[in-house]
Structure formats: structure tokens, C-alpha cells
Image: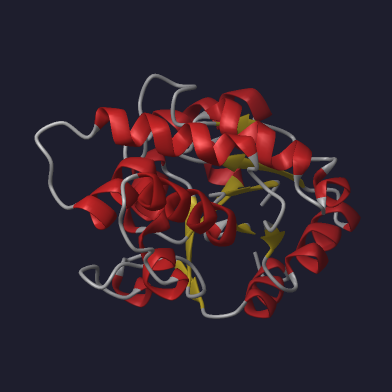
């Protein structure tokens, strides 16, 4: 394999603490009690609208609350965001092997770029080859368009690319794009979703160090 692509929230980065702080502030504005971090973090993969629905239930129109959540989040977007443990070692291994890597996320591209540039470990991500957001390709995962755009930007056939994700939509998008897919066991999986091992990815890893081992075999 010549390149690895990663989902962002829950796969490469633990963004839950900053999102939790933003959601707690929104709930406070609305006179509601906060949701525990360990409950909320399981739903981060569903984006801002999914977090609003978790906090406020199904609404006829949740646009205003979703917009407000994003506004609050953007004000202090990455002060507590970190790479998951051992993924700095994985990125170093990719570099030493001459492999490129990038990010394909459903997060808005501008927000994702802001995270990468402002998080405390930003220097570890300096050689990210590309960033495709949920609004970059005109479609969002599970549509394969974002991953196909990434392959085009890399100038590589999809058969030379691995895509790593923590949500069924990641694996579906990767499979539809024709890439080798890897599901991870440390991400944000809601209670109503099957465990990652059942997502029919080409490979499944439970821990980041398992991903490092997989790198040596692909």
C-alpha cells in the first residue's frame, strides 16, 4: 500500500472533550443539565446534528441549535483534542516507510482544518497530504465520492490506499470506493450500532498498536 487515509473524530483524534464542552455550554444556554462525557462521546461520529438530537431529542427543526453548537465549538475547538495513544508512532512509521497519509472526514473542512492547526499536537500532523471534509466533494460518507477525490488528489489507484475508520459509514464508503478498509475498536460507536468487528471491513484492530502491526503486513 502506498497511502493511508483516516477518518478524523474517533479514529485519528479524540475530539470528544472539546465537543463535550461545547455541547455543555449549549445545554446551559437552554437551561438544561449537561450530558456526561462518557455518554456523549459514543455519539460524536454522528456530527453536530446528531449531538443536538442526543441532547434535545427529535425536533421539527434543529437547524438553529445545530448552528449554535458549531459556533460555540469553533470558539475553542481543540484545546483538549489529542491523537489517540500510539498513533504518533503509527504516523512516524508511515513517514519512515515513505508512505503518504491524509484525512477524509464528514466534519466540515474548515472546522477540520481549524482542529488540525490549533490542537496542541499540531506539529505531529505537519505532513498530512490532504484533508477532505464533509463539504469538499459534494457528498458525505457513506458515499464514496470523498474517498475517490482523495485518491485523485494523491494520484494513486484506489487499490493502493487503505482507509481507516471508526464508523460503519467509513467502512461502507471505503468498500464502495474499492479501498482496503480497516475498522478500529477505540472510536465513537453509539449503543444502537453493531460492534466494529461486524462491519465487514477487510481488517479490524482493537488497539492502535495493532494498527501499527497491520501496517507491517500490508
What residue appears at the point 82 percent right and 68 percent down from the top-left corner? Answer: 89
Relative image position of residue 126 (x, y in whole percent) = 85, 41
Q: Reply above or below: 30 against 37.
A: above
Residue depicted at 45% across the width and 61% down the height: 166
How are the residues colored? Answer: secondary structure
Residue 114 falls in image quadrant: top right
Is residue 170 visible in the rendered image? The answer is no
Task: Please tell me which residue lies in front, 95 or 190.
Answer: 190
Q: Which residue is more in the foreground, 9 or 197? A: 9
Q: Is residue 36 visible?
A: yes
Above or below: residue 103 compared with residue 210: above
Say if 173 sits above or below 189 in the image: above
> Residue 50: x and y, percent?
29, 48
Residue at far front of view:
31
Number of marks drawn: 0
37 vs 46, nearest the viewer: 37
Looking at this view, name the residue that lies furthest to the left.
Answer: 60
Q: Is residue 37 left or right of residue 60?
A: right
Residue 82: % across, % down: 71, 60
Q: Position of residue 2 (x, y in %)?
A: 70, 46
Image quadrant occupied by the C terminus: bottom right
In the visual, does 172 lie left or right of 88?
Answer: left
Residue drawn at 38 percent across, 29 percent down: 67
Residue, x 66% and y 32% (percent of image)?
113
Amino acid at each position: 500500500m502506498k497511502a493511508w487515509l483516516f477518518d478524523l473524530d474517533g479514529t485519528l483524534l479524540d475530539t470528544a472533550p472539546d465537543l463535550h464542552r461545547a455541547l455543555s455550554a449549549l445545554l446551559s444556554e437552554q437551561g438544561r443539565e449537561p450530558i456526561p462525557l462518557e455518554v456523549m462521546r459514543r455519539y460524536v461520529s454522528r456530527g453536530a446534528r446528531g449531538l443536538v438530537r442526543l441532547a434535545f431529542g427529535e425536533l421539527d427543526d434543529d437547524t438553529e441549535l445545530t448552528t449554535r453548537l458549531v459556533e460555540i465549538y469553533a470558539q475553542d475547538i481543540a484545546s483538549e483534542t489529542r491523537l489517540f495513544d500510539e498513533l504518533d508512532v503509527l504516523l512516524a512509521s508511515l513517514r519512515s516507510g515513505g508512505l503518504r497519509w491524509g484525512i477524509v472526514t464528514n466534519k466540515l473542512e474548515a472546522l477540520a482544518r481549524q482542529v488540525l492547526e490549533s490542537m496542541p499536537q499540531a506539529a505531529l500532523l505537519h505532513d498530512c497530504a490532504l484533508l477532505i471534509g464533509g463539504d469538499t466533494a459534494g457528498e458525505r460518507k457513506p458515499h464514496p465520492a470523498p474517498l475517490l477525490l482523495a485518491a485523485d488528489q494523491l494520484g494513486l489507484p484506489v487499490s493502493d490506499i487503505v482507509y481507516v475508520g471508526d464508523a460503519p459509514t467509513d467502512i461502507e464508503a471505503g468498500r464502495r470506493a474499492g479501498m482496503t478498509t480497516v475498522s478500529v475498536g477505540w472510536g465513537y460507536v453509539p449503543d444502537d450500532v453493531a460492534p466494529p468487528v461486524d462491519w465487514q471491513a477487510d481488517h479490524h484492530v482493537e488497539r492502535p498498536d495493532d494498527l501499527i502491526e497491520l501496517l507491517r503486513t500490508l
